[in-house]
Image (tube, rainbow, N blue to C red):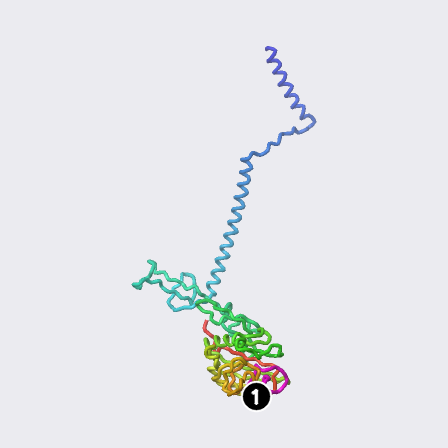
Amino acid sequence: MDDNSRSHKMLLLLLLASMVGSNVGGQIPQTAIIPPTISERLASLENRLTQRDDELARMLQQMLSNQNEILRLLQSSLSFPTDGTQTLPAGISCPKCVRSNISSETGSSADSNNMAQIVTHPYNTDLYPRSCREIPDGMSGEETIYPSAGRAGAGEPLEVYCDQDFEDGGWIVIQNRFDGFVNFNRSWEKYRDGFGDIGTEYWIGLDEIHRLTVAVPHEIAFVGESFQGERRWARYSLFEIGGETDRYRLDKLGVYSGTLGDEFTYNKGMEFSTFDQDHDTFANVNCAQRTASGWWHRSCTRINLNGMYGNESGVRFTYWLDWLHLQGLKRTRIMIREIKKRRK
């Protein structure tokens, strides 16, 4: 063995001895901590993302299942207009749905499967009540109604005060007075458009009264209260007024019933008058100026519910002639109501 080989062998023995010696006394040799490689990190991240994807997929599946259940419940509860010719998809019950074939000039179906188009204009009177009769909770108070709601949509909303206490409820209050805070001696424009605040003293407006009564037959009721606390009422089975071009003429007035006395019939057929537009039949006298109120004056009137407020007597104060002659009233309310409930 040459000297170089002998030297290499000695170095290996010394290195082995040092490694064995480091474990003397039961000590565990320290091993080097090797950091993970980039590929190992990417593999770990990919595994975590996969787990998140699985979790999100389960959540989305649950959401879709809930959504399908909600849609099923809605389809079973909504009401649709119908012409009686529809055939609905299997599993859907909708007795009031309109379906119409899309036909060509020859009258055949536009598509090969003879599919029908469902009209998508559902409305629900719980969401879009057309009158105070259709308010679901039956409580008096301020409400929003949709008088023209139908297959074409909800239509324009109208803010009203609903009286649900008088004669089985369902009344739209068109005039309300109880403390004299609001001045009712107003111009033609104000009576046309309305004034005051709903829920307090107010006049709803001749335009709105015309639109409501000409569209659907209405009745009218008057309620009065004296300063002594006595209350009386009058009711007419039909009420309708014309439009502005006809000066809001009191066109239709039905049969009277009540305890106030039949005084409103005197105004039937008359146009509305205000201090700036005189349409009464009293020669050389403007009845609206004389009574301090806009009304369907003839020559002039036997009731003056838009007159001055106060516990006084005279033609300028709020009165019902057949009850307390010209003595002012403490409270007055005029209401209209659809004669019959409309079909849904």
Q: Is residue 146 above or below residue 112?
A: below
Could you tell me if residue 242 is visible in this image? yes
Q: Residue at x 48, y 75 (%)?
A: 211
Q: Residue at x 49, y 82 (%)?
A: 271
The residue that label 1 is drawn on is 321
Q: Residue at x 60, y 75 (%)?
A: 200
Residue 212's spot in the image, x, y percent?
48, 75
* Residue nearest the observer in this picture, 144 or 208: 208
Q: Is residue 119 above or below residue 342?
A: above
Q: Residue at x 50, y 85 (%)?
A: 280
Residue 18's spot in the image, x, y percent?
66, 22
Q: Is residue 62 above or below residue 211?
A: above
Q: What residue range appears in magenta?
A: 303-319
- The amino acid at mark 1 is Leu
Q: Residues within 10 Å of mark 1 (few under 14, many from 20)?
A: some
Residue 329's spot in the image, x, y percent?
60, 84
> Magenta stretch: dominant SS?
loop
Residue 1's spot in the image, x, y percent?
59, 11
